[in-house]
Structure formats: structure tokens, C-alpha cells
Image (tube, helix red, strand yellow):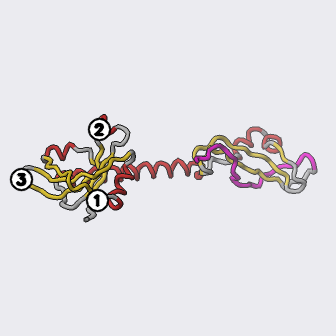
Amino acid sequence: MIVYGWNSKFVGTRKIEGECPSCHSKDMQLVGHQNVFHICWLPVIPLGRETHATCCSCGETYQPETILGEKAAKTERFGIPWWSFSGLFIGLLVAIGVMFWDASKKENIAAFKADPEVGAFFTYKDDDEAFREVPYCYAKVVGIEEDGIVICLGGYSYSREDMANKSFVDSKLNSDEMYIVSADAFQELDIVHFSSLKK
């Protein structure tokens, strides 16, 4: 479950020159809070700031303009803290990491298609309408011949890629279903995962 919403986080305090209208103390400070939109309590986007002038003697709270005047209050306000964008930065780093991972995966699959390893298992997606509900199948490269690549098909198909990948270990191959696939046809297979696991 993803938890999201907004909350207010403490930014800091700053001593200011001014007099409390209630007790006339000159011990005044600004207190700042930053409102942020969060996902799972991780700040993503700053929404606005709240700044109050507080008397350190009596505890009364005022708008900064009341103590400093409108012009001075604008210059004394707190800036937007960097951490209010931390969720955005983390999300960007994750997205870049996923992009690099996906590019590396595609490169490795292309290399496997160009030079398949005997004994390697692979998962492919079958676009045939008959497999629309369970499109993921697995197979094993059992040999390389002049006219193509010999593959042994798994006896099952799955609705999710991870289930087919797991079947490398948990399921048996149907040794009767062996086919010779041309190099061009092997290139056309929508291979989504492969492993050098030997059985």
C-alpha cells in the first residue's frame, strides 16, 4: 500500500529584533515550517512555508509582519530546504538506475540470441492468441547444429514472467518437445530472461 499526502516539517528558528506586544520582552525568534507532499512519508514536492514570530518569554505567537513590519518580514523568511525535494531526487536516481539496468538486460539478451549457450535456459513471451492469458514459456538450448538451434520446450506456460523464470529449477522439461529453430527465427523470439543454469 502506498501512503501519500502532505504534512508540515520543522525548518528551524532564528533570533530577530522586536518586542512582544503581550509581555514587551525583546527575546523574540522566528519559527519556520515547510509543508511538503510526501509518498510514504518521504518529502517529494514543497507546497508552501509557514513562518511565525514567537516570544521566548511568554510563548505568544504572531505573524512576522506584526513584529518586524511587512518589508523586513519578507527578507527574514526561511528558504525552501533542500530535503523537501529528497523524494524527487531519489525517484530520479531510481528511474536512471532502472533505465541502465533495462539497457544492460537488452544488451545481454541480444548477445545471448547471437551466440546461445548450450545448456542455457530462457524465458520467452508467446504472442499467439492461444497463450494470451499465459504468455510466458521457458525452454532450454540443448544443441547447436548447422541448420539451427535445438531447443527443448517446457511443458507449461505462465501468466507472469517471474513464474516462468522460477520454473527453471522447479519444473521438468518435456524432452519430447524438441525443435530445431533457425538462427533468424531464434532472433525473432521475444526472449525476456535467460540463465546459464545447467541441468
Q: Residue at x 64, y 45 (%)?
A: 36
Residue 195: which disc?
A: 1
The answer to whether residue 170 is visible is: yes
Residue flagged by tag 2: what amino acid is it?
Asp
Based on the picture, tell me whether residue 16 belongs to the magenta stretch. Answer: yes
Q: Secondary structure at mark 1?
A: strand
Q: Secondary structure at mark 2?
A: loop
**Most extreme residue toward the right, as rendered?**
23
* C-alpha gap between disc 2 and disc 1: 22 Å
* C-alpha gap between disc 1 and disc 3: 23 Å
Q: Is the C terminus in the top left, top right, bottom left or bottom right quadrant? A: bottom left
What range of the chain is rendered magenta? 1-22
Residue flagged by tag 1: what amino acid is it?
Ser
Residue 146: which disc?
A: 3
Comparing 85 with 166, the one in front is 166
Q: Earlier in the sequence, mark 2 or mark 1?
A: 2
Mark 2 lies on residue: 127
Q: Are marks 2 and 3 in contact (CB under 8 Å)?
A: no
**Most extreme residue toward the front, as rendered?**
176
User: Taking 7 as reference, is 154 left or right?
Assistant: left
Q: Residue at x 20, y 56 (%)?
A: 141
